[in-house]
Amino acid sequence: MNQANLIILVLFYSRHGATRKLAELIAQGVESVPGCDARLRTVPAVSTVTEATEPDVPAEGAPYVELDDLAECAGLAVGSPTRFGNMASAMKYFWDGTAAQWLSGALAGKPACVFTSTGSLHGGQESTLLSMMIPLFHHGLMVLGLPYTNPELMTTSSGGTPYGASHWSGLDGKKTITEDEKRLAIALGRRLAETAVKLRAVA
């Protein structure tokens, strides 16, 4: 039976580009799996000035996410830079607006994973990844991590955790993604897509 490819939503917020680069690597891993397409989406920034608004379409890069993207995806990767050991307010604001999807169970049973970048090496990568999992659990998503069958988890001296992909971007956000970080991000995207394919096969 000929079916359309599965859509894997790679949803991220990136201020200086480091988290976006991780998102692109995860998308690369997703698209290495036959029958899967990555859909890169971002969220608008949140302003402390209440009358300030973002344009309806970003000037560049990935389009803003729409709630329909959640309904249409077969899997979901969520990424945010670290803000004091937590996800950025822009990503939190997006999830705060998904009550209708929570009530309807639109995401229940779908696989998901998380990723982050930090300015300092011990700047809260793991706590940020764990905090991003919380709304995903409430939505009924099945959250995946990275198993230690990925040898880079034992050799990395920067980012990369069993809770999800990560990157140490430096205080200026310009540190290059290491080979270990790159391989782990691609592996996470591949694992997410492979899980979505397996779940679709038994649905």
Image (cartoon, grey):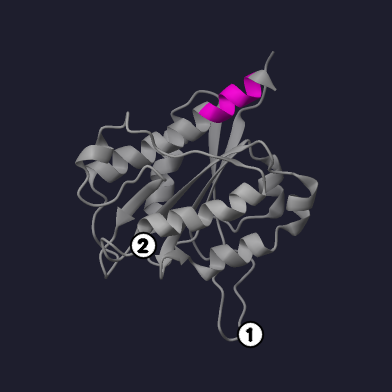
Query: Does the magenta run of residues contain 135?
Result: no
Three-letter amino acid code at the position of disc 1: Thr
- The main secondary structure of the magenta stretch is helix
Task: Say whether residue 18 is visible.
Answer: no
Could you classify mark 1 by the number of other residues whose Cα lies within 10 Å: few (under 14), some (14-19), or many (20 or more)? few
Residue under numbered circle 2: 124
- Residue 106 falls left or right of residue 116: right
Task: Say whether residue 126 is visible.
Answer: yes
On residue 191, the disc is none
Residue located at (51% from left, 31% from top): 193
User: Which span of residues is magenta-colored?
Assistant: 195-201
Could you classify mark 2 by the number of other residues whose Cα lies within 10 Å: few (under 14), some (14-19), or many (20 or more)? many
Place of residue 9 in the rendered image (x, y in percent of width and height, measured from the top left) = 57, 44
Place of residue 189 in the rendered image (x, y in percent of width and height, measured from the top left) = 45, 37
- Residue 203 falls left or right of residue 91: right
Place of residue 123 in the rendered image (x, y in percent of width and height, measured from the top left) = 32, 65
Residue located at (53% from left, 28% from top): 195
Check the picture and name the quadrant holding the C terminus: top right
- Residue 191 to residue 69: above or below: above
Marks 2 and 1 sit apart, C-alpha to C-alpha, by 28 Å
- Residue 49 to residue 155: above or below: below
Residue under numbered circle 1: 50
Q: Earlier in the sequence, mark 2 or mark 1?
A: 1
Residue located at (65% from left, 51% from top): 138
